Amino acid sequence: MAFILRKKEILIDILVRLPAKSLVRFVCTCKSWSDLIGSSSFVSIHVNRNVTKHAHVYLFCLHHPNFERQNDNDDPYDIEELQWSLFSNETFQQFSKLSHPLESTEQYRIYGASNGLVCISDEILNFDSPIHIWNPSVRKFRTPPMSTNINMKFSHVALQLGFHPGVNDYKAVRIMRTNKGALAVEVYSLKTYCWKMIEAIPPWLKCTWKHHKGTFFNGVAYHIIEKGPICSIMSFDSGNEEFEEFIAPDDICSSWGLCIDIYKERICLLFDFYPCEEECMEKRWKQLCPFIYSSDYCFRTIGISIDNELLLARRGFDQGIADLCLCNYESKQALETDIKLAVMRYGEIESLFAINYVESLVLLNN
């Protein structure tokens, strides 16, 4: 009996180091391997190892694969040329091309990623936009049902996906607002397959606000909100369903050039133009030494990588592309990736997409 258990431990120790693509093939080897690899315990061990050891990590980017070919459109690059791909997090070589899980030719957008799952939906998010929770590693996805809680049209929609370790569940948080200030917050549970309407909305959130990029950390969704001249951070814990507001530092008077992400296990605000002195900071915020960009280029901060490096987009003013660079915040050393990100325009808003993606087997038995 002890020999059999030891043999199983050795097998798990070997298999857990392999990429998801190999493990998916091994599922067809025999029933015992299929049961082992598909078990919730193995899936959890595999993804936790990848996250903690930064194994099988990629850059998930929307890019121009043939950026030199131009046409006569206002945008110098064909929309058909845009491609979602995974790139090596070390060599920046293209690892695989990704297409829509439903084989749709329409462009999609990522609204959060966690433990190998990505949340995708329409480029312009509406209250009735279909949502897909997708694992490109195992080529499986789940489409949450249309919510039955919504009885009005919403003009502004924010969406985030993340994992809540306290309840061991993946949650999609959707916040919707009408032009007249009506607000609705819904949470989708991957464990229960259903939406839940949040009834207790704090008074400070029931106002006219603009939502901007958000992030998800330890089961809590964070969004930058702008209420008149005030910028603040709204947090929503998808486990206990409680809201909280954090006022941004006084010198951040606009959301333009403002980004929120995770840096060394803490919520971090990244501001492209920030003149504040450290003495002016509120006690709950800590200002890090600024990173000075070269004046020869236009840089924009996209986010922070799993290795706590800045994801920077360097671009010209009249081009539809941006060069993705990684910068070590402490050493101030920048690294070229040769990845040509696509600059997506939605009216006056420009968006670029580059995030870290960690392989997992979540949804393997979906």
Image: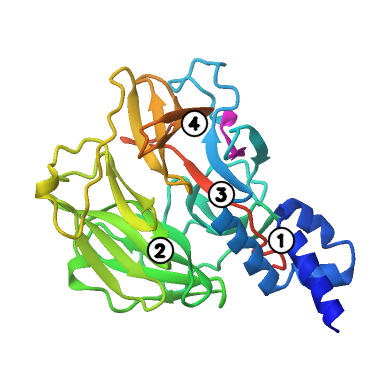
Residue occupying the point 31% across, 52% down: 268
Whether residue 305 sits left or right of residue 254 in the image: it is right
Q: Is residue 66 magenta?
A: no
Q: Residue 174, labelled with which disc?
A: 2
Q: In whole angstroms, how far apart are the C-alphas of marks 4 and 2?
A: 27 Å
Q: Is residue 250 above or below residue 348?
A: below
Q: Could you tell me which secondary element the residue under label 3 belongs to? A: strand
| Label number found at residue 341 | 4
Query: What element does badge 4 sit on?
Result: strand
Disc 1 to disc 2, C-alpha distance: 34 Å
Q: Quick one: label 4, few (<14), some, or many (20+) residues within 10 Å?
A: many
Q: Earlier in the sequence, mark 3 or mark 1?
A: 1
Q: Is residue 87 magenta?
A: yes
Mark 2 near mark 3, Cβ–Cβ under 8 Å?
no
Mark 3 sits on what residue? 357
Residue at 41% over, 62% down: 217
Marks 4 and 1, how far apart at CA: 32 Å
The answer to whether residue 148 is left or right of residue 105 is: left
Residue 227 lies, in percent from the top left, at: 17, 55
Find numbered disc 1 in the image and state the secondary structure of the residue it sits on.
loop
What residue range appears in magenta?
Answer: 80-88
Instruction: Name which residue type carries label 4.
Output: Leu
Depth-wise, is mark 2 or mark 3 nearer the camera?
A: 3
| Image mark for residue 209 | none
Q: Position of residue 112 (x, y in %)?
A: 47, 54
Find disc 1 in the rendering and name its residue: 16
Q: Are marks 3 and 4 in contact (CB under 8 Å)?
A: no
| Mark nearer the N terminus (2 vs 3) | 2
